[in-house]
Image (cartoon, grey):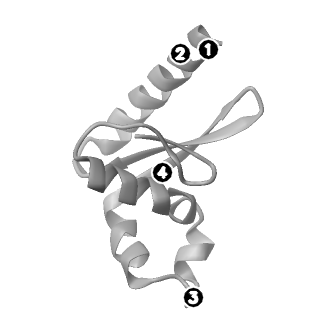
Amino acid sequence: MLVDDSGCLVAGAGAWPACEELAAYAPLLANPHAIASASVGSRVASLSPEVEVRCLDFDGAEVLLCGRGGTVARNDSMTRAAAGCLRILRAAA
C-alpha cells in the first residue's frame, strides 16, 4: 500500500480495515527509534516484525510504501513495488 507521510492511505490492496490500520501506523513503523520508545503502543510493536516500510521521495514529497506478510520474498517484492509506484506517480505528474 502507498501512504502519505501523515498516515493517510493513498492506494492499497486487501481488506479495507487492515489497509487503514497499517496506513495509520506506517509513519511510526518507518521510524525504528519510535518503535523502541516506551510511549509506542503494543500494537505498533507487534506489527513491526511483520511489516516493511520504505520511504520514497517523489518530487520532494515523501510517501511510504508498506508491505506485510510474505517474509521470504518480501524484499524483492518491495523493490519491484517501489519502482512501479514511482513509475506510476511520474507518469501521472
Dots 2 and 1: beta carbons under 8 Å?
A: yes
Residue position for label 1: 90
Of pointers 4 and 1, the one earlier in the residue sequence = 4
Dots 2 and 4: beta carbons under 8 Å?
A: no
Quote the CA–CA distance across marks 3 and 2. 37 Å
Of pointers 1 and 3, the one earlier in the residue sequence = 3
Q: Residue at x 28, y 55 (%)?
A: 18
Q: Residue at x 24, y 52 (%)?
A: 69
The vertical placement of 84 against 54, above or below, is: above
Foreground tag (4 vs 1): 1
Which amino acid type corresponds to the residue marked 4 in the rendered image?
Answer: Val
Horizontal and vertical percent for residue 79?
A: 43, 32
Residue position for label 3: 39
15 or 87: which is nearer to us? 15
Q: Secondary structure at mark 2?
A: helix
Which amino acid type corresponds to the residue marked 3 in the rendered image?
Answer: Ser
Of pointers 3 and 2, the one earlier in the residue sequence = 3
Quote the CA–CA distance across marks 2 and 4. 18 Å
Which amino acid type corresponds to the residue marked 1 in the rendered image?
Answer: Arg
Query: Which dot marks residue 87?
Result: 2
Query: Which dot marks residue 57?
Result: none
Location of the N terminus (image quadrant): top left
Location of the C terminus (image quadrant): top right
